[in-house]
Image (tube, helix red, strand yellow):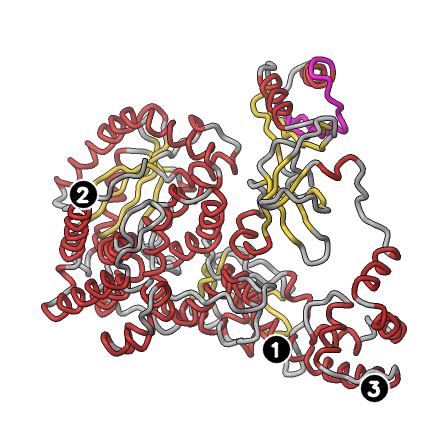
Amino acid sequence: MVKKIDIAQENKEILNKYRALLRACKDKTNVKDKKDIRKAFNLAMDAHDGVRRKSGEPYIYHPLAVAHISAKEIGLGATSIICALLHDVVEDTEYTLEDIDRKFGSKVARIIDGLTKIEDMFDKNLSLQAENFRKMLLTLSDDVRVILIKLADRLHNMRTLSVMKKTKQLKIASETLYLYAPLAHRLGLYAIKSELEDLGLKYTKAEVYKAISLSLNESKKERGKYISKFTQPIKEALKSENIKCTIKGRPKSIFSIRNKMKQQDLKFDEVFDLFAIRIVIDSKAESEKADCWKAYSIVTDHYKPNPDRLRDWISTPKANGYESLHTTVMGHDGKWVEVQIRSVRMDDIAEKGYAAHWKYKNRDSKDSSLDGWINKIRDLLENPEANAVDFIDDFKLNLFFGEIYVFTPAGDLKTLPKGATALDFAFEIHTEVGRTCLGVKVNGKLVPLSQVLKSGDQVEVITSKKQTPKKDWLNFIVTARAKSKIKASLKEEKKTIGKEGKEKLERKLKQLKIKYSKSVETELVRHFQIGDSLELFFRIATGVISNNELKEFANNRGIGWYRSIKNKISRTPKKNTKTDNDKIIVFGGNDEVLDYNLSKCCNPIAGDEIFGFTTVEDGIKVHRTTCPNAIEMRSNYDYRLIRARWVGKDSINFIAYLMIKGIDRIGLMNNVTKVISSQMNVNIKSVNIVSNDGLFEGEITLKIHNLSFLNSLIKKLKKIEGVKTIERSYKLD
């Protein structure tokens, strides 16, 4: 039965949402701003009239929600609110950018252009997602509001993702985890970053999310009591010192809890810092640093601090502008508690990121590291020839979480990502310093260019005009700036060599009585299965493609595409020849039987949720939906993904890997192998167990029929005395 739509009620709800938007931005708008917002709202209403979202709601709910997030949760002003209201108008309706420019001016039109997706009109071998992301960033270098509004748009889409099909949920959630959550982090939007991560986990790892969420809810009451008891003496002491502040406890995000459980191999009840206490001090600008340290002294007077867990981001703020004091102290009942101390200004920047940074910019004499970061993005965008996916990979290098602080010989401070090398530092100083870097001294000693730097290092770069970038530099470089500049230099060198290769090719084709043309060039690229013409010319110049191979190409030209491919296959022995595996997986909506290989990065077995991924050289690879590479594949190469499902054949043996840990005792491994071989009748392929100081951990490789059988086996193994954890892993190293 179709639900009857109450138009009057919907109109009332639209009006309520619009009024809520005006309340959210009342401190940032004047009378003219409100008139312009009203004009944008009326245009959006007209443009989206009669259109509904997948949920059945009027489409106008979405731009209103994006505008509200932009205003209230990010702190943006009138121009951004207008753009948020109109962000889908050009993409989805008859209105054009020219219409927007005429009604609202060029600034609004340019931002909306940055938010409008590229039409699907280009080579299918390119990633539409990556191209659209690059387009946004082209505008980011001029106006950061493009990205901030896009993050608001993405947040609302994630909040309403439940109405979408599962394949769409996985695609959008993967994009979010791969790019948008790290980007929110880099722009200092911690609250939005955490919510995007949690929602991304909810749709990519639903069971994990549900289990942690349930455990958090169950412990909520107990946690509240503990926070109240912990904060009471601190509140009294701060009050006696006349320090005005608010103190609140907040749970850690589900995503961060899950990461901690995974990285440290912990169960939920073993994670000690499930929540953090935040002290926000109402301080004047000139005394906020001193007040924060005073509060720190009071906290550590009452609770013993862990000396290894002090983080001073007040003296040296993070690269995204984040300022705060973090310490971990021993609370009641032997529980570790994280305490964050910051001023109202610092808290505003931590919650609203770049928008708040601009609010306080005039009062802050220090240069913004965020501005410096945007300049680095501008550098990345200078290379228009870069492949969009490569660009996104380079861009992600700039979304680093951990940071180190190193010094020049003159004592200037430079911020670099954790793991950065001496060569990264050289490129951080200047591109030309990096390109001509011959050697590096760290703390007065000559070190390799690949030397990983530590906070506090003082670095001196030795240059030579004769030095040029080397290809092996890419093996240890970390920063996006350095990587993109090295690639650009190498490409220029490759172009020079490629020019010689093109001339050589033209001469050889002439000898073979083939007239050189663009279409012949395309034929050659396809024949040799390489990416582009430049690579073709380079390989010919360097002799990778021989004269004999060019002759072979000439001979095959006349026999047609099918026979040419057939000849190639007959000459090349098939890798991973299948026997029984041939028809156990079908693909697409029509359940086609296609040739494929099971991916070795995640080792799917019958019963796993799977998808097919079309590779450039190895045909279709089947992956688990939880594959560690799935998020990147869905984010950058969604057009290559094929729906896949199992069609039975439990008689087939698949390889499964189990990681097992626990307390060692005599006879334990005998118990384990007995359950596997005798009780469950499973073939053990290999066992590798290491015991140390009463503990053991190791890997078991099995031949198994299907997922349900494997899950039953894991349940039985968990019951063995001494086994602490046993779980399926992706691949043994």
Report the front residue among 262 and 612: 612
The picture places residue 64, in percent across and down from the top left corner, at 24, 55
Left/right of residue 202 with respect to residue 31 in the rendered view: right
The residue pinned by badge 1 equals: 436
The residue pinned by badge 3 equals: 507
Report the front residue among 476 and 645: 645
Q: Amino acid at mark 1?
A: Thr
The residue sitting at 80% across, 76% down in the picture is: 540
On the question of residue 96 being in view, the answer is: yes
The residue sitting at 51% across, 55% down in the picture is: 418
Label 3 secondary element: helix
Q: Amino acid at mark 3?
A: Arg
The residue sitting at 27% across, 27% down in the picture is: 226
In this view, the mark in front (2 or 3): 3
Marks 2,3: beta carbons within 8 A: no
644 within the magenta span: no
> Which sits earlier in the primary sequence, circle 2 or circle 3?
2
Q: Identify the image quadrant of residue 338.
A: top left
In which quadrant of the rendered image does the C terminus lie?
top right
| Range covered by the magenta-colored residues | 678-701
The picture places residue 705, in percent across and down from the top left corner, at 70, 27
Residue 181, numbered label: none
